[in-house]
Image (spheres, grey):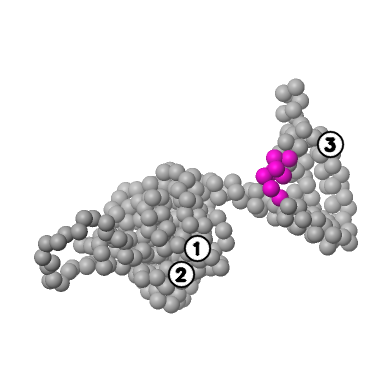
Amino acid sequence: MSYHSHMVDNIVDNSPQDNSPRDNSPRDNSPQDSSPHDRGRRLRIAVIGIGEAGGAIAADLATRPLDVSCWDPAVGEPPPEARASGDARDAAAGADAILSVNSASAARQVAREVAPALEPGQLYADLNTSAPSLKVELAALVRPTGALFADVALIAPVPGNGLRTPCLVSGPGAERFVSLFGPLGMPAQITGTEPGVAAARKLLRGVFMKGIAAAAIESLAAASASGCEDWLHDEIAQVLEQADPALLDRLITGSRRHAQRREQEMQAAQEMLSELGVRPRVSRAAAGWLAQLQSEVVRGS
């Protein structure tokens, strides 16, 4: 399980200037009395889960004028300049924002562990890749605490990007997340006020991106068995290099218009791959989609 925390600093107070005599007495900046918008107090960010992704984000946060605390039972030391917490609840206590950067399998447990420490005004952001239904469940766990929940979907690799990783954000805490992390350099786009919206868009995008990868892997494996891997690699690279919106339109409309012929082509491809010793997973799925498109054409005619 991995954990991640992050906190934002020095929010500008745009209220009208007060020219009355200043009170130079010491200020009480204790957690219970200070707001994250108080001038002069560092924002407190808790990162719960400092594996590959959480660790990269926490490391970037720790280079900013923030108070960053981390907790991860599987990782010994936090990034330099970040503070190790005793447990997840300790990391979240008093934090302005809590970032859960673990896995879908750990997300529920982390939210339950942290919930007793959450208070109104805090932000709990779940950055884990999961089904929209899990994000809705996590939001329900957070809601009774008065903290705001943000469903955050990271849509680019975190290693190498860290805090600069683009993301989609939804849920009641979406605006709060953008207001805190946008000024720190995180490209964030709000996709809705309901939890699960951002997660759904990431998964939809993932069907396409991982589908392309699977098709490339399968076809190159077959090409390798046929002795023409370099040729096919160059062909695929050229298609990707020249890709534009018109190509997407042609793929969609052409598949519908020529579904029957293309289904037969994919059936032949399945036979060839099987003979080459390559399991035709993608080819079989493509044939299934083309068969469905053909049946839709027949029903509509």
> Real-space Cα distance between discs 2 and 3?
52 Å
Q: Nearer the viewer, residue 110 or 81?
A: 81
Using the rendered view, name the quadrant where residue 288 is placed. Answer: top right
Residue at which label 3 appears: 261
Q: Is residue 35 left or right of residue 220?
A: left
* Location of residue 301 in the rendering, given as x and y in whole percent from the top left corner: 75, 22
N-terminal-most mark, 1 or 3: 1
Q: Are marks 2 and 1 in contact (CB under 8 Å)?
A: yes
Q: Tag 1: Cα neighbours inside 10 Å, few (<14), some, or many (≥20)?
A: some
Q: Is residue 10 left or right of residue 162?
A: left
Say if the magenta span includes residue 142: no
Q: Is residue 177 left or right of residue 10?
A: right
Between tags 1 and 3, which lies in front?
1
Using the rendered view, name the quadrant where residue 229 is placed. Answer: bottom right
Q: Is residue 76 above or below residue 23?
A: below
Q: Tag 2: Cα neighbours inside 10 Å, few (<14), some, or many (≥20)?
A: some
* Location of residue 62 in the rendering, given as x and y in whole percent from the top left corner: 41, 72
Q: Are marks 1 and 3 in contact (CB under 8 Å)?
A: no
Residue at left offset 76%, top offset 25%: 298
Q: Nearer the viewer, residue 6 or 15?
A: 15
| Secondary element at tag 3 | helix
Residue at which label 1 appears: 164
N-terminal-most mark, 2 or 1: 2
Q: Tag 3: Cα neighbours inside 10 Å, few (<14), some, or many (≥20)?
A: some
> Real-space Cα distance between discs 2 and 1?
9 Å
Residue at left offset 37%, top offset 53%: 176
The segment highlighted magenta reads: 243-250
Give amino acid for label 3. Arg
